[in-house]
Image: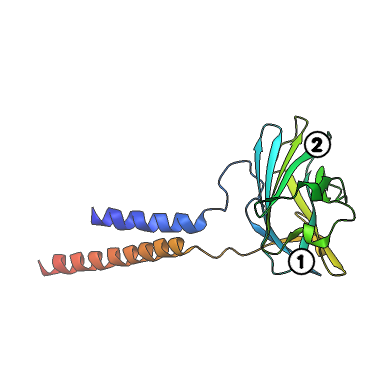
């Protein structure tokens, strides 16, 4: 029984470290991960999308240390592409309503859906470092966020701007941040390793007892 428990602990620990950030089949690979621009700026964001029917709830957390994200978009990476109408219903920044500061199709990212800070808006209206903005969009039926959906954003700081486009290479590529295992995962790993070590000790003791019998 003890051997089974130790073996189970080891398997749980290995599974905890190997588990991806999101486990729902069909989700885009970038959802919930922190992606960073790769050249002029070091702007990072974690974007999570929840789709219910013809409504998208897009949560954008700027995990970088500087820079403001002022345009966002989603697109299909493989045909067939989607074309239709969509609208921005609301935008909530750190719990405050900022819907009037954002609009659709303001600065094109050549995306299927794109929205951004209204023209002439203040630079502070974007998703700044440490900010979390929740957008709600509605669209004609047919748009689906899945593994074939790409993500893009346009960010700036002073006179420098940068685009982050998933799947792109070169200056506009998005770079995933290496995920550091959570303390619980490390604890499970330690438990599993200890279990494996304990199994070895038990086996050696049994062998000695058998030899002395």
Left or right: 206, with 119 as reference point:
left
From the viewer's side, name the closer residue of 29 and 99.
99
Q: Residue at x 45, y 61 (%)?
A: 185
Residues under labels 2 and 1: Cα distance? 27 Å
Image side of residue 210 versus residue 96, left or right: left
Q: Where's residue 79, x and y in %?
A: 80, 39
Which quadrant of the figure has residue 192?
Answer: bottom left
Residue 138, quarter of picture = top right
**Snapshot colouring:** rainbow
Closest to the observer, 61 or 28: 61
Give the left or right position of residue 8, taking residue 149 as reference.
left
- The answer to whether residue 185 of the structure is visible from this angle is yes
Callout 1: helix, strand or loop? loop
Q: Label 1 crowding class (10 Å Cα cut-off): few <14, some 14-19, many 20+?
A: many
Q: Nearer the viewer, residue 10 or 137?
A: 137
Circle on res. 86:
2
In the picture of the structure, the residue carrying the numbered disc 1 is 67
Q: Is residue 82 visible?
A: no
**Looking at the picture, how far across and down is residue 188, in whole percent?**
40, 61
Residue 101 x %, y %: 80, 51
Compared with 159, 172 (above or below) is above
Residue 162 position in % (x across, y down) = 82, 63
Report the residue at 34% width, 63% height from top: 196
Identify which residue is drawn at 82% across, 62% down. Answer: 123
Mark closest to the chain's N terminus, 2 or 1: 1
Q: Residue at x 65, y 64 (%)?
A: 177
Q: Which mark is residue 131?
A: none
- As drawn, which residue projects farthest toward the right? 120
Secondary structure, mark 2, is strand
Q: Judge left or right: residue 12 versus residue 172.
A: left
- The extreme left residue here reads 213
């Amino acid at each position: 029984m003890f051997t089974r428990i130790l073996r189970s602990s080891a398997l749980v620990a290995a599974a905890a470290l190997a588990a991806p950030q999101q486990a729902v089949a069909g989700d885009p690979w970038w959802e919930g991960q922190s992606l960073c621009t790769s050249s002029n700026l070091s702007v990072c964001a974690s974007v999570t999308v929840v789709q219910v029917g013809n409504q998208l709830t897009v949560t954008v957390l700027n995990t970088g240390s500087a820079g403001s994200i002022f345009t966002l978009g989603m697109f299909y990476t493989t045909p067939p592409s989607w074309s239709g109408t969509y609208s921005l219903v609301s935008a909530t920044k750190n719990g405050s309503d900022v819907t009037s500061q954002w609009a659709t199709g303001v600065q094109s990212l050549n995306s299927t859906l794109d929205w951004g800070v209204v023209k002439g808006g203040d630079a502070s209206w974007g998703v700044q470092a440490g900010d979390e903005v929740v957008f709600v969009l509605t669209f004609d039926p047919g748009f689906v966020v899945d593994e074939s959906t790409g993500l893009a954003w346009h960010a700036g700081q002073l006179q420098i701007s940068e685009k982050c486009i998933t799947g792109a290479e070169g200056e506009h590529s998005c770079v995933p941040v290496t995920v550091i295992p959570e303390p619980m995962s490390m604890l499970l790993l330690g438990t599993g390793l200890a279990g494996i070590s304990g199994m070895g000790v038990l086996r050696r003791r049994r062998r000695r007892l058998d030899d002395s019998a």
